Amino acid sequence: MTTTPKPKRRRHTRRRALPSGIQQPPWQSIRNPYPPAEILSPDALEDIHRASLSILEQIGIEILLPEAAEYFRQAGAHVTGTPARVTFEPELIEALVAQAPSQITVHARNPERHVRLGGDYVAFGLVASAPNVTDIDQGRRTGNRHDFCQLLKLGQTFNIIHVIGGYPVEPVDLPPPTRHLDAISDMLLLTDKVLHAYSLGRERILDGMEMARIARGIDHATFDREPSLLTVINANSPLRYDRPMLWGMIEMAKRNQLVVVTPFTLAGAMSPITVAGSLAQQNAEALAGIALCQIVRPGSPVMYGGFTSNADMRSGAPAFGTPEYLKAAQISGQLARRYRIPYRSSNVNAANSVDAQAAYESVFSLWGAISGKAHLIKHGAGWLEGGLSASYEKVVLDADLLQMVAAYLEPIRTDSESLALDAIREVGPGGHFFGTAHTQERFENAFYQPMISDWRNFESWQEAGSPSALQHANALSKTALTQYTQPPMDSAIREELADYVARRKAQGGVRD
Amino acid sequence: MTTTPKPKRRRHTRRRALPSGIQQPPWQSIRNPYPPAEILSPDALEDIHRASLSILEQIGIEILLPEAAEYFRQAGAHVTGTPARVTFEPELIEALVAQAPSQITVHARNPERHVRLGGDYVAFGLVASAPNVTDIDQGRRTGNRHDFCQLLKLGQTFNIIHVIGGYPVEPVDLPPPTRHLDAISDMLLLTDKVLHAYSLGRERILDGMEMARIARGIDHATFDREPSLLTVINANSPLRYDRPMLWGMIEMAKRNQLVVVTPFTLAGAMSPITVAGSLAQQNAEALAGIALCQIVRPGSPVMYGGFTSNADMRSGAPAFGTPEYLKAAQISGQLARRYRIPYRSSNVNAANSVDAQAAYESVFSLWGAISGKAHLIKHGAGWLEGGLSASYEKVVLDADLLQMVAAYLEPIRTDSESLALDAIREVGPGGHFFGTAHTQERFENAFYQPMISDWRNFESWQEAGSPSALQHANALSKTALTQYTQPPMDSAIREELADYVARRKAQGGVRD
């Protein structure tokens, strides 16, 4: 390699300049054209399916909200006891689940940011729900509105992010009764992408929907026709749904909004220590949640969320990006496809800093999600420490990883220009390709240009102070913030949104 | 998670203690039972196949060794000019390639360390051919025999490593004429695993074979029947094989030893800037090399090596673990399977230190290799800086990654014990699984126990000095060296080997 001539320096060399600017592909829908990994045989997949139906028939799900239990009862499920235990005949659960759509469009306030889920489409979400925030300048601190807004700006700036939220970090300095009003308002004002609002009881999710509707400038009928918000529903594993989550499912499904049903089946803790057992339980919980949405409104949009991982059996802490996680992510995709329901996975790790561990656990997670053909990858950028911290640097590192994944998902072409026989003939044995017309014509965009990877030779890298990927990411996070521009919003809409927040605050917000 | 009880502390908690000891699975053959990723359609794969046949028919390969050109001529290829340009009718190349075996066993001096390649089998190799060596204690330095031996000891100690060499780092302080004698002797004495010797001309590879034969204590007929050594042949891309490599192919094939034919097609530099063009050229070069081995000895063992990556178009330096690399690794597997020849890939990155970049580029490489169903992953542990450095810490980090891959490749079971309905029934809604008999019976070995991943909570981790993965790896590399034990060797064999080295040194080694 030392004898190959250097390419001519051209305009694109500016991309190299860190941290003076960020070069990134434009916002676009990403499609995954590759066949999914099918690591489990059809028979073994049926074993898991049947086990989950047995769980639902013989053990059942505890449903802590009477209104939800009543929905199940009216649909023909067996409901007994207090709190209600709901069991299902296999035929009933299969019939309900079959009503879920296999393709979904979620509408953003900016029509250019609508997100399609299902089929070949895949979308990436910003980190959500971290209680802490961290960067190498200030270290780890409790979530607050300033960092919350800064992370939103990063999520808006990086085009590879399609979905914002929940909250990238919890803005703990906002009072709980009205926190969701300010937080969702910030999300709507600072970004124009698809939003995720929390299901923390009935009132909050109703507020979330109304604010999403106002921000889109649409009437109620249009809102009911066009999913414009998503929520994530976690089972209180094992086999229980609690009141706030059940309200979220009911109210969101009523309005035809997207419910992402995601059991948190941590093998060895909240589910059996075996991957098969955890997946059977995950599947039972997911199908029960999906069934409720279909009872409330047949055909309402849902996703099948897979989050099965394993506990660190020494501490009980969740581990991510493990071999067991990778298998579970791929098999969860097989299960979701069995039901023809779009699949949600994640980009997760359990590292305490943005080091090699954070990177390899993340890429193992992405391997599972992408080869498992996930349609939505939550926590796509910024998640650290098993979700206990949102990291500025990790947002940037992950944005780079997601861009790499997107470039990987562009299939290669095998037309005669791409096969390049003429160039090979022109260069001949022992030559080099830098100078050929074939190379020069494709010079700028032939390969993905990473944001972080530092490919300088060792000596140049050392002269530059031996910067780590973490340091590059830190610098880029600042650059990205300087490049942030607030997306426009019609002033009438802005006013209506502010009025809504003010009115709900005057009412005292949510008292619970 | 904060409310889940801690598991009882048991014997296995000792695994946590870093750096006092290394817990690792035993040496074992690894099998990859999963279907390969097929990201290219059969038609598009044929486009590449046909393009490579056109290259071989219309452009040809430059063959710098007259003896090799003569082999090609006698087999029916067209040979013209000086240096010889060899072209092939498609039928000829296909007939020759079809003679290669699809399953290979390479014999180590320790019969328990034989390696099977092909089918579902996959083996992992130590880093090879780095000119420099690095660790965080002493920094980067030129390769030398001390570090060479230390890295061999690491390769012997980590059970996940199946194949040693070439040289993990070049022992530059050994004089070139006899370096291979001392280096191969060190490899044979310090390890008992399958070896890779360099094809640096005729005499060196003959020495390598003879030393491998002596170390196994077998006669020449057995050696000719049982592949006992492998060599890697790089085309001098584009479309040229040089004399040292051609000697390697000829002499190794003559003796029925394993030739891993690996063009280094760096898109934009030594091959076209398109992935399809680079793969067409890679395929042409690989098929020509494989054909030569089959001419020399029909049925001799070969591997199809894929190493296509892309140049950093700003510097000309090779990049690894890129989206283009990942696609090329998967498609190379499709090509190798098309010819029913075992496939060799790599675990590579272009980072200058063991940071997040090194980790994510490596896992992208492993993603390509494993989903591409590679049978041999060269540079499996320790490669850094695009191959310019072997890193002590990266050896350990990669050993952990390879162990994770091996754990991922263990398929999940879906028998009724694994589906765990009884445990799910016993625990019931809202319970936890730590205390169940089902969990306790599987507590120790349910999940892969990483060597490096630090899953302590943030506070404990911070109290411990916020160690990075790099620091863990550094400590573990020292532990591993203290745990190294030299594998036994029969004293008569040891003596015969020493005599051979002494005799060849007395003859002056290799003069070139």
Image (cartoon, coloured by chain):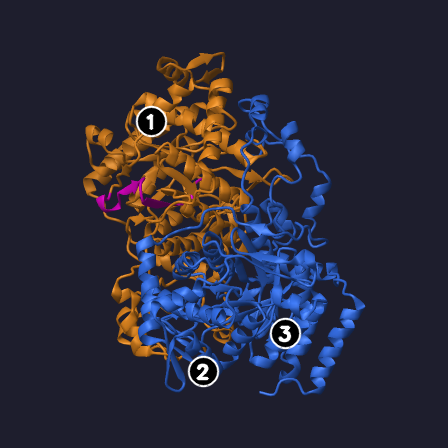
Chain colours: A orange, B blue
Q: Secondary structure at mark 3?
A: helix
Q: Which residues are magenta?
A: A110-129
Callout 1: 10 Å neighbours few (<14), some, many (20+)? Answer: some
Per the image, the residue denoted by label 3 is B208
Report the residue marked by disc 2. B64
State the residue position of label 1.
A98
The one of B295 and B349 positioned closer to us in this rendering: B295
Crowd tier of the residue under label 3, counting other residues whose Cα lies within 10 Å: few below 14, some 14–19, many 20 or above:
many
Residue A13 can be seen in this image: no
Mark 3–mark 1 CB contact (< 8 Å): no
Amino acid bearing label 3? Gly
Residue drawn at point x = 66 percent, y = 53 percent: B27
Discs 1/2, front: 2
Asked if the magenta segment contains residue A113, the reply would be: yes
Residue B37, given in percent of the width and then of the height, sits at: 42, 50
Front-most of residues B149 and A249: B149
Classify 10 Å Cα crowding around label 2: few (below 14), some (14-19), many (20 and above): some
Q: Residue furthest right?
A: B491
Q: Amino acid at mark 1?
A: Ala
* Residue B503 lies in quadrant: bottom right
Residue B303: mark in rendering: none
Q: Quadrant of the C terminus of chain A?
A: top left
| Chain containing mark 2 | B
Helix, strand or loop under label 2: loop
Q: Tell me the distance, in whole angstroms, between the alpha carbons under discs 2 and 3.
A: 23 Å
Tell me where residue A245 sits by quadrant. top left
Is A447 magenta? The answer is no
- Chain letter for mark 3, please: B
Q: Nearer the viewer, residue A263 or B337?
A: B337
Q: Are marks 1 and 2 in contact (CB under 8 Å)?
A: no
The residue sitting at the top extreme is A81
Location of residue B82 with respect to A12 vertically, above or below? below
